[in-house]
Amino acid sequence: MRVAFLLNDLQLSGGVGVVVQHARRLSLLQGWDVTLVMVREQDDGGWQGYEDLASLQVRSRTEALDEHYDIAVATWWETTFTLFEMSAERYAYFVQSLEDRFYDHDKAERLGASITLDLPVAFITEARWIVETLSSLRPDARCYLVRNGVDKSVFAVPESVEPSLDAPLRILVEGSARVWHKQVPEAISAVSAMREPHHLTVVSGDPESLAGVAADRVVGPVDHAGMAELYREVDVVVKLSRVEGMSGPPLEGFHCGATCVVTPVTGHEEYVEHGFNGLITDWDDPMGTARLLDLLARDRSLLHFVRSNAIETARAWPDWEQSSQFMTTALLTIAREPQPDAVAPSAHLLADLRAGIDAYSRHLEAVRWQPVAHWLLGLRRYRIVRVLSRPLRPLIRRYRQRH
C-alpha cells in the first residue's frame, strides 16, 4: 500500500504532528510505503522538531508527481490544490478542523477553505463533531473517525495524583499569543483576575510576543518531553480557544495529573466532563473563569477529585499505536471502495462558490461606501445638519431594515 500525505511544511504544530505520528506508524507495517509530500518549496529541509522521526520518506511536490500511489491524502485545505495533480487510485482528505473558521469573514481564504469540503473525496477526521458536520454538509461522502492518540511513553499516566493541599494553585497556559483563536492573552488576563494565590506558567513557541505579561514564568519553545514535565508540575491547564478540531494540551495535561478549565470549544466534548474531570467556563468571561480557578484554589477536595478523574479519562484514551490502527483500517477501506462520483460534489462546490462570490461582492460594495458613510455621519455634529435631516429619518430607518 503506497500512501502519500500532503503537507505544506514540517513546522512544529499540533496538526502536522498528528500526520507525522500516523505516517511513522504506518511506515512500519509490512507492505506499506508511506511518503510525506511537501506541496510548497521549503526554506529549511530539517524536521523542525521531529528529528526522531527522520526515517520517514519526504518528497517535494515535483518529485511526487512522478510517482503513483494507492491513496493520496490532503491534510490542510491548501494541500488540496495539489491533491488531484497526484497520480493515485484513490483520494482522501484528512480534516482536523473546519478550517474556514481560522479566517475572518472578509478573507478570501475563508471561502477557499470552505469549498474544499465539496471535493469528491473520502473524509477522515479526528473528532465526532466533525463527522456529524460533514455528514450534514456532504451526506453523499464517506467519513471515517480516527481519534488522535497520545504518546504515553512521553505523557505517562501516573498511578495516582498527589493531593495539592495548601500551595498556590499551579496553572499552565499554552499557545501562541499571535494566533487570535488560541486566546492566550485572554487566558492570562483571566488568571490575573484571581483572588486566591496562584503560580502561572505560560508556554509559547514565540515567547517574545509575551514580553511583560503577568506570568510567573514564560518558557518555550518546548518539545514534547519538556511539555510533559511542565504538565506534571501544574494542577490546571487553562485553554480558552475559540476554534479547535480537538485540542490536545488539556488531554496531555490529563495524562500527567492535571485537570483543566476550558471553553466549550468544538472537540472539548471528546474528553472533558464538567465537574467530573475538568471545568467548563463561558465565552468572553474572564471574571467567571477567574472564579472557577479560585474555586479550585480554595476547594482542594474538588481539585483532587477532578484531577483523579482526569487520570482515569487518560487511561482509557488510545495511544498512537491504537489510533494508527484505526487510520490503517480507514485507508484500507477507502482503497477497497470505489472512487466517489464527482457529479454531486461538483454541484455542491459550484453552489457554494456562487454563494461565496455573492457574499464577498456585497462586502466589497459595503467597504467601498464606508468612507462616504463615515463622512456623512461626521456631519451630524453640526446642529443645522441634524435639523435638516429630520424629514429623512423614516427613509433611513426603512433602508437600515432592508439592509
Image (cartoon, rainbow, N blue to C red):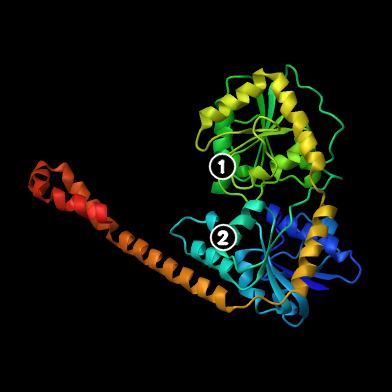
The residue closer to the viewer here, 121 or 235, is 121
Q: Quadrant of the C terminus?
A: bottom left
SS type, badge 2? helix
The residue closer to the viewer here, 244 or 402, is 402
Identify the residue at image location x=65%, y=43%. 269
Q: Amino acid at mark 2?
A: Ser
User: Is residue 90 toward the left or the right of residue 105 in the image?
Assistant: right
Q: Identify residue for label 2.
A: 136
User: Is residue 105 toward the left or the right of residue 25 in the image?
Assistant: left
Q: What is the x, y in percent for residue 222?
A: 74, 44
How crowded pointer 2 is (Cα within 10 Å; few <14, some 14-19, many 20+) is rated as few
User: Is residue 209 toward the left or the right of residue 219 in the image?
Assistant: left
Q: Identify residue for label 1.
A: 183
The residue closer to the viewer here, 205 or 400, is 400
Q: Is residue 144 visible?
A: yes
Q: Is residue 183 above or below residue 161?
A: below
Q: Amino acid at mark 1?
A: Gln
Q: Which mark is residue 49?
A: none
Identify the residue at image location x=45%, y=57%. 105
Q: What is the x, y in percent for residue 210?
A: 59, 40
